Image (spheres, rainbow, N blue to C red):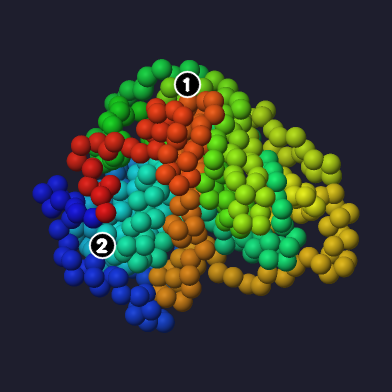
Amino acid sequence: MKISRRNTLLSASAAAATCSLIPGKVLGANDKVNVACVGMGGRANQLLPSFPSDLMNVVAVCDVNLEGSYRGNMLNRYSEAKQFQDFRKMFDKMAKEIDAVIVCLPDHSHFPVSMMAMALGKHVYVEKPMAHTFQEAQLMMEAEKKYKIVTQMGNQGHSGTNYFQFKAWVEAGIIKDVTHVDAFMNLKRRWHPWGKISSYPKQKKPKSMDWDIWNSTVKMNPYSDKLDFGNWRGWFDYGTGCFGDWGAHVLDTIHQFLDLGLPTTITAKKLKSAGSLLYPKASTINFAFPKRGNMPAMDINWYDGTNNLPPVPKGGSKSKKPGKFIYSKKYTFQGGHHSEPLRIIPDKKMKELLKKGALPKNFGKHSSHYANFLLACKGDEKTRSPFSIAGPLTQVLTLGCIAQQFGGKLKFDRKKMIITNKSKANAQLARTPRKGWEQYYKI
């Protein structure tokens, strides 16, 4: 990736990047990973303290508003770390001191920070979804492969019970011949009460806020508290809505262990209060996947919206918590989100299998998602949600978001990776970056 020094995006020496590409094992068994965290607002309050302190040093923190009231707590907690407002200047001054970067930013900002870090040979942990567009996810996968660094997407359940249970049940032939999935997230979202919005609202920007960097690759829109703090998720330009937020926590094991890859069609079966700027208040999106090896063709219905729930199968339980029903030729499964384990329904079937000893149930002890990343940086483990695995899942999420924008049926060519029947929808696969941010899209 060529990064312009004139734009103050990088002046760290190539030697710094080369050193970082040496396998993490050279850190030594007792050495800690030197971490920089970009984004010190709301999510970082939960995320950063979850990384084991005995495995890392926080050497740098970065945020577009260092004086923001909701950032202050985290900045005080890591007061010994050097503070920056511009991630580009952080890398410019500290590239040699940083081993890994934790990205806790709005969806639209994941890409440039991650790409710059990878180009410098830094390991990257990025919140889900790992990118805002289909193209960005593709480029991040290519960068991971080129720069040979450790990556992890922050769908934490991918290191929990559901991950190891799903894997074991697939290997034991308990989960097989899946034909349909109903997945859902029916909690109220921040943008639901706003009503119909036809233009971006505008408010006075705090003096301490660098709004140019906050917008990063996206066209400049006015400052508003309906964007920052934490309200960006509902806007097409910045977030990935309910599906991008929760799909990574509900569909992750289904996508990986059923080898779904990319769909052939994406159909918006229901859109409620859809607009030109905000994600709908409710939607039902269908994804059709072709036959994969010995696995039959299958489809997924995604339901969001407070009253838009899927049908409950016999023996299942109705829940407004995010979750899924998985239908196979032999069994029906009900599951939740993140690390929540699956159960076979009706319950008597699961009890019969347990009594026979036919259900694997001891999955051993494993590192947390956060420790897994740091241990992988040290060369002791491999990450469970690297970009090579999280990337295609993220691309499915972005395709769903496009369907929520345009409605109807989208036909997708899995080999060419294009939408073939709607040119405007196909144009949304890639972003035209704002002037000055184009270089991140070149590897």
Residue 18: x and y in percent read 24, 70
Q: Is residue 36 left or right of residue 297?
A: left
Instruction: Identify which residue, 438 or 208, lies in the foreground.
Output: 438
Task: Give the mark nearest the N terminus, 1 or 2.
Answer: 2
Task: Answer above or below: position of 281 versus 250.
Answer: above
Residue 81: x and y in percent read 30, 61
> In terms of secondary structure, where does tag 1 sit?
loop
Residue 301: x and y in percent read 64, 37
Q: Which residue is mark 1?
A: 275
Residue 39 visible in the current orientation: no
Residue 178 visible in the current orientation: yes
Of the residues shown, which amino acid type is indicated by label 2?
Leu
- Numbered label attached to residue 211: none
Task: Point out the residue furthest to the left here.
Answer: 6
Instruction: Identify which residue, 134 or 224, lies in the foreground.
Output: 134
Q: Are marks 1 and 2 in contact (CB under 8 Å)?
A: no
Q: Which residue is mark 2?
A: 120
Q: Is residue 411 left or right of residue 150?
A: right
* Residue 359, picture quadrant: bottom right
Residue 110: x and y in percent read 37, 48
Instruction: Identify which residue, 432 or 5, lies in the foreground.
Output: 432
**Quick one: label 2, few (<14), some, or many (20+) residues within 10 Å?**
many
Of the residues shown, which amino acid type is indicated by label 1?
Gly
Q: Is residue 381 left or right of residue 270?
A: left
* Distance in Å between CA atoms under marks 1 and 2: 40 Å
Task: Answer above or below: position of 420 versus 349.
Answer: above
Q: Is residue 347 left or right of residue 171?
A: right
